[in-house]
Image (tube, helix red, strand yellow):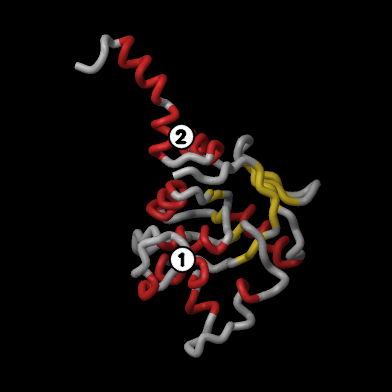
Amino acid sequence: MKREKFDLLESTCVPLPLADIDTDQIIPARFLSATSRDGFGKNLFRDWRYDKKGNEIKDFVLNRAEYGGAILVASSNFGCGSSREHAVWAIADYGFRVVISDSFADIFRNNALNNGLLPVQIPSEMLSELTAKIIANPDLIVKIDLERQLISADENGISVPFAINTFRKQCLLNGLDNIDYLINMRSRIIEYENSRGGPG
């Protein structure tokens, strides 16, 4: 599936400094019946955003006017729990392109990368510093440079590298999913097969 290319993102952030946020909190199980990826964003963190009558819970961060942007700044062990891919769909459909944490559940990380959502892992002390800066200044712009694998904020402030698998990086940079990537490699695959005398 063709996706928007990811290179340099500059955005304000939404801070959610809670550890062990699981996939059922991200998107409750009762909203998993849909098969399309669209529309899940409206129920992202549903039970934290709304009360039982459907009214907004005003102090939850997604309901606070001062916070917004394409970067969600979370805390440790983000995306734990069940392996539901819908959690990534909900985050992406809401408008987030990046989730920053100091640790991710492995299945969530893989689901995110498979769906064009960039999980950025940074050291705990840097995460705490970044979160504090965002809370103190909701207008803070954070830059995610995927090509250089660098996150930065403030001209003389935070600057920290992050790791990412080379294959996943190339898919994100080029807006490709796994199948598109293989199709783009078709000529090289044929060349390799021919150099071996063909299949068999």
Indicate whether 166 appears above or below 143: above
Residue 20: give its label. 1
* Label 1 environment density (alpha carbons within 10 Å; few <14, some 14–19, many ≥20): some
Tell whether 189 sits left or right of 124: left
Answer yes or no: is residue 40 visible.
yes
The residue shown at (44%, 71%) is: 25
Q: What residue type is labelled 2?
A: Phe
- First of labels 2, 1 by sequence position: 1
Q: Is mark 1 on a helix, strand or loop?
A: loop
Residue identified by numbered label 2: 167
The kind of residue tagged 1 is Asp
Instruction: Identify the residue shown where x is 40% and y is 31%.
Output: 183
Question: Where residue 121 appears, x then y in whole percent?
Answer: 54, 49
At 56% from the left and 86% from the top, the residue drawn is 55
Give the mark toward the camera: 2 or 1.
2
In the foreground, 171 or 79: 171
Question: Percent from the top left, x then y, of residue 192?
Answer: 35, 15
Q: Is residue 100 in view?
A: no
Residue 198 in picture, x, y percent from top left: 26, 14
